[in-house]
Amino acid sequence: MIASLRLTTSFSNFAAPSLHLFHPRILPTSPIPFSDASPNPKPRLRLPRPAPAPPRHPLQPFPHLPPRRRVAGGAVRPRAAVAVAVSGAVNDEARWRPPPGGREGKETDLATLGNLCVDVVLSVPCLPPAERDERLAYMEGLAASPPDQKYWEAGGNCNLAFAASRLGLRCSTLGHVGEEVYGKFLLDVLEAEGISVVGMLENTDVTACRRAYETLLCWVLVDPFQRHGFCSHADFSKEPAFSWIQKLPAETKTAIHHSKILFSNGYAFDEFSPDVIASAIDCAIDAETLVFFDPGPRGRSLLNGNLDEQRALEHALRLSDVLLLTSDEAESVTSIQNPIEAGQELLRRGIRTKWVVIKMGSKGSIMITESAVSCAPSFKIRVVDTVGCGDSFTAAIAFGFLHNLLAISTLALANAVGAATATGYGAGRNVAHLDKVLHLLRESDINEEETTWTELIEGCSACPEVSVLSKTPINGVSKPFVNVVPVCGVVTDLLSMLKAAPERSAVQA
């Protein structure tokens, strides 16, 4: 639910299909100032992670952010179904400490922060108008006649959790779900997919402002040209939707400590105050939990937002282990047009950053580490719907990181998972199942445009070792350190590893 961009016509930016996609242009803006940092020791492409890498320079405490205005009133403690705790979660503060052995013993592979919503997907003759009051009237008109439940779908970070779960990862979602019919629907869907929910409603009373405690509802509108528009009540509020959450609840901290990865994106700023988001990242670092962050389209408005938002965005960019951005978003936060150089700049600025993943849309994807650059073309498919493709892509990146896959193999899998989602209609429970992913991998029909990678590599002034996934040798690249990786070998290894995913997924469900 993005306040400034949610209503614009858009396509999801992901690194999978090769047809019928374009990206909304985000104009470059001045980046947030970062301190200079000395480089990390060069990591290997295959990333075993025994212990956290030493920081490039001492960690700086995140400055205190003044609390947001509390909404009048509060909320009753949710029923047990709303605040389902992860296995072993307790309210004892002593359990907030990192478990012995770092990430060993963590029950959850991936936890998502916020962005739990119900999408109402409707076909409309035209997308919402641009003027604010007209948009609000348009949305109120939609809400006046609640659509049949067949148009409802779990949205937001549920897409990521579903895709990750189908790859065999154990997932939980951290966020607020209300007690109304939409909240019950969302909890039922997540439970059916084997995904736990950790509620964030604590010691409040809903009587004064009930809407503030309801489940987030997003209208996903599709016009005859398959363009998407999004609108929700969060678009018309200056405060985050859940501004009454002023600190991380005990159960949320426990869940973060029991997770291997905490994922957050720019949409979290539409729900929580910057201080809460920064606190979640700090909690993850204390727990030796990996932090994945995707600023998304919201990144541009946060760059130009208030001081609290700018500082929290900088906090997330500097302290994340893995950053995921589209090429436009990378340019927006660095003012560097070449995506490889933009990724290198984000690595230089970061304190803990190990991977920077750039989603190139229909072209494919790029991963930048301290020692290498990896490029993987997209898969050729017939695109049906792009909603949820970026979330599916991220699920595969998490899988690759946790399983110590080579960078080029991780990108190939992520491209395939994103592409598989694009071949179906809608997101939520419609994101790619493993059989579609395996089918694309077996076909290995990748979109090889030599010009794309040649121009990017040649245009990079300080390019380390480069690996490019390909069916055929790439000609015309003058740099001697380009390593062409045969797609057949990568696919063989992935297919062997993914054979166990259906069994793991079935056990979780």
Image (tube, rainbow, N blue to C red):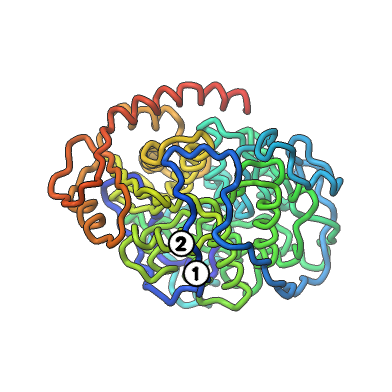
Residue located farthest toward the left when viewing the structure as drawn: 476
Towards the viewer: 339 or 395 = 339
User: Eyeballing the image, is 133 above or below 217?
Assistant: below
User: Eyeballing the image, is 198 above or below 301?
Assistant: above
Picture coordinates of residue 487 (x, y %)? 28, 33
Picture coordinates of residue 259 (x, y %)? 66, 42
Q: Under tag 1, what secondary structure? A: loop
**Spatial distance from mark 2 to mark 1, Cα to Cα?**
8 Å
Of mark 2 and mark 1, the one earlier in the sequence is 1
What amino acid is found at the position of numbered circle 2 in the picture? Answer: Arg
Query: Which residue carries the number 2 mark?
Result: 348
Examine the image and state in which quarter residue 24 appears: bottom left
Residue 276 seen in the current view: yes
Q: Are marks 2 and 1 in contact (CB under 8 Å)?
A: yes
Q: Quadrant of the N terminus?
A: bottom right
Query: Which residue carries the number 1 mark?
Result: 36
Picture coordinates of residue 47 (x, y %)? 48, 39
Residue placed at 53% from the left, 62% from the top?
A: 317
User: Eyeballing the image, is 35 above or below 420?
Assistant: below
Picture coordinates of residue 397 (x, y %)? 47, 43
